Image: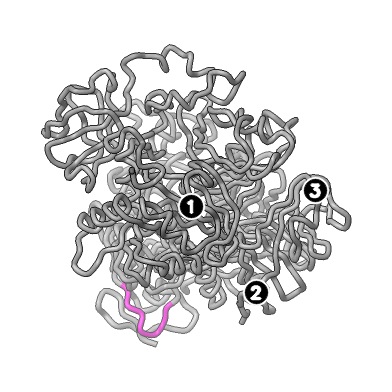
Amino acid sequence: MKFTFGGVEYEGQEGETLAAALVRNGVLGGFRSLYRGRPRGVYSAGEEEPNALVQIGSQPLQRATLVPVEDGLVAEPLAGKGRLVGPDSTRYDTMHAHCDVLIVGAGSAGRGVAAPARGRVLLVDGMLEGVEITLGRTWVVGLYPGNYALAVERGRRLWRIRARHVVLATGAIERPPVFPDNDVPGVMLAGAAARYGDPVGVTPVSAGWSPRVHLWSQAGGALRWDDRIGAPVPDGQLSGVACVGRLTGEGLPDAPPFTLPGGDEDAMFVDLERDATVADIRRAIGAGLRSVEHVKRYTSIGTGSEQGKLANVNAIRVAAELLGVHPGELGTTTFRPPYVPVSFAVFAGRNRGRLFDPVRVTPIHPWHVAHGAVFENVGLWHRPRYYPRQGESMDDAVLRECASARGRVAMMDVTTLGKIDVQGPDAVEFLNRIYTNAYDTLAVGMCRYGLICRADGTVLDDGVVMRVAEERFLCTTTTGNAGPVLAWMEEWLQTEWPDLRVWLTSVTEQWATVAVVGPDSRAHLAALTEIPLDADSFPFMAVRQGEVAGIPARVCRVSFSGELAFEVNVDGRRGLDLWARIYAAGEITPYGTETMHVLRAEKGYPIIGQETDGTVTPQDLGMGWIVSTAKRDFVGLRSFSRSDNARPDRKQLVGLLPERRVDEGAQLVPGPGHVTSSYMSAALGGPFALALLARGRERIGETVQADGVAAEVVGSVVYDKEGARRDGRPA
Amino acid sequence: MADLHELELESQVIVRGEPQPGFPVEPNTTAGRALWLGPDEWLVIGALEEDFPAAAAAVDVSANCVCFELVGDDVEQVLAQGCSLDLHPSVFTPGRCAQTLLAKAQVILHRRDAETFRILVRPSYAPYLQMWLEDAIRE
């Protein structure tokens, strides 16, 4: 087979690495060091290789000592830095594995443990492969408490392994001696030279062996300095983790005594990848540094992609020599995952492109797509933002949709709102404690708007609470907070009030919900249902059961626009059907989240997360009316008497009438204050905004500057302040 | 290669409170139509709210989940790509169930037999999960 290196073609042999093939072809150099540009060559035969880094196709930072040679392989030498070259067609993925025994290292010690082991055994090795090895060419890169290991198979698959027992048989790495010009091509670790067949021109060197203590230390294992081998070895116990073979120091030869030879210390390399020398360590110590952690940071020894596998023990020995102390007194630098470099693509796995994150859609989604909706992300949901007609801009579409909702009738898919079924004899008491207002006074068949505060009195979420039976309620949440509100309720129920007999069930997707909005909504729905819809039979905030378009439905008279509106809830599987039938029943305009935002803002209704930011109280929003003064207690109550929450200079929600449209987030001068929402209003015929402004309510009538635009401060309700439109077209 | 298809499930109901007659009480097991979801929570397939008048709560969730069935001699290898539970047949035996994460979707896994898993997931996550499973099956 043929491969090229640095543009030159060579002959490769089956089963050898790129480094072995280069050495066999007499290429002892071919590389340059990163900072000093010194000629370098293959130095080792493993993952500790500091010199022979190559770029292969899209993959940078590959070690020639680990890459199997293949026919047509094209490798370019790299000096330390790699570059990502896209596109990368590799398939990356993740596997979860569980085993009784995880054995790391398939040398003789590891195989010796694996052979008699019972149960589910995983034998893993970074270099080797073979029938008795469960995961060949797989590096265990991290070992964490609880015997949780991360491993990378062939650079493309991440293994997440939970093991009952871990046996580390990671062996030892040969240590280079420190002498002048110990980095020139041809100087090679003795073990590597032997593996490559002791080729002509190679100078084999060795200063002993250092156990691969990395995983043991990562998992929290202690180390001690072993004078016989001149390196740290595992010390003490670690629950569920055992060390065997040369990792323990057993079977390793005695290290030759360590001395610094005379000569040019600036050419005595300690970290070849970082071009760091004995001279650098001497400078660090001269600067007053004593800790090996500090010496590492001063010299950058051990910070290359090879992470000091060759350099760190020598750095400790050199520093100890220069300081005149025993190396055991200096300790070691910290061993951190990953043991070998891992590309970000491996961690991403298949969470890329269309699988990057779930896209949640409602049952009505196919209709939205077919009718040209432009979508926006709300949490993980894709919601229609607006439905442009041919050639229509977003602003034009939103003005048209708003005008329909205010002037005639429009419809929106509000299925994404969170829904929580609350049942039990203590449901009323529970809701009284969770929401700021009272629920004992809510009649069956009626609903009520509610706010949930955190313990510090800031607004967490809002929604509508519907009493469907004496001991059963349905609470809605904002789209993004469906999960957090359920978790919030469960936390209080389970940790603070376990005596309450209440059961919570998420039913967000049980129901599909369509809002029919506008002065003609009553007439539009009347064609589809027998439920009496007149204001006397079906008052504001009432709930009615019946059929809509032949589908069993629960209909609520709630409004997030100020207009007469009905929300029709049906079995989620009938949602698309319901939507299509309402759409077909007469002229009606579908609208999206942008129009919904404008309509609610004209009425001063806050959006959680837009008008609120975790510091905003109900009183700041001008919603003191929803905070009960009669209830004995509820979450947030105590905080309303805190002096900070009673400060008169708090930011308060106000409306702005600017000369032209301002940016959301714009700071207000004089402030402090900022714009929270900003839109064009079809109803007002111009721009308006909502803002949080210090002492805002006192300042109604003043003019402020928002990004250089003059704006009149007004109340937060800029449209239909009297609420005359709630029951339909005003007489 | 494993086969993935969607199943049309009968009605489903969440039952809360004390175990009703015939309900499993060992965690993460099933008995008949009832799946153990928590110490006071079961999912019952093919039942209605009114079937459990003595329960603390019963909630119709028939539209709250869709069900995929994954069949093949490599089902564990497919699921292990996105599920951290130990699904080995000696551990996650037929009849076992669990609420867990599969890729980035919350699911209920239910092993029907050695080669068959049911995967219940919120309908909004179904298109994502189906894409993910089809991709994992190819691996």
Q: What number of labels is visible?
A: 3
Q: Position of residue A402 (x, y in %)?
A: 28, 52
Q: Tell me which segment is drawn in magenta.
A: A69-75
Toward the viewer: A88 or B52? B52
- The residue pinned by badge 1 equals A567
Q: How is this picture coloured?
A: one colour
Q: Amino acid at mark 1?
A: Glu
Query: Residue A342: where, in percent of width, then height?
Result: 44, 58
Residue A128, numbered label:
none
Residue A565 in picture, x, y percent from top left: 42, 49
The residue drawn where x is 65% and y is 54% is A168
**Which is closer to the viewer, label 2 or label 1?**
1
Residue named by callout 2: B7
Q: Is residue A500 left or right of residue A715?
A: right
Q: Say above or below: A697 vs A183.
A: above
Locate the C terminus of chain B and report the quarter of the image it occupies.
bottom right
Q: Chain of mark 1?
A: A
The structure residue drawn at horizontal position 40% and vertical position 52%, both measured from the top left corner, is A378
Neighbourhood count class around disc 3 (C-alpha, 10 Å): few under 14, some 14–19, many 20 upward: some
Label 2 secondary element: strand
Which of the chains bears the disc numbered 2? B
* Res. A689 image quadrant: top left
Sequence-first disc among 2 and 3: 2
- Select label 1 or label 3 by which is in front: 1
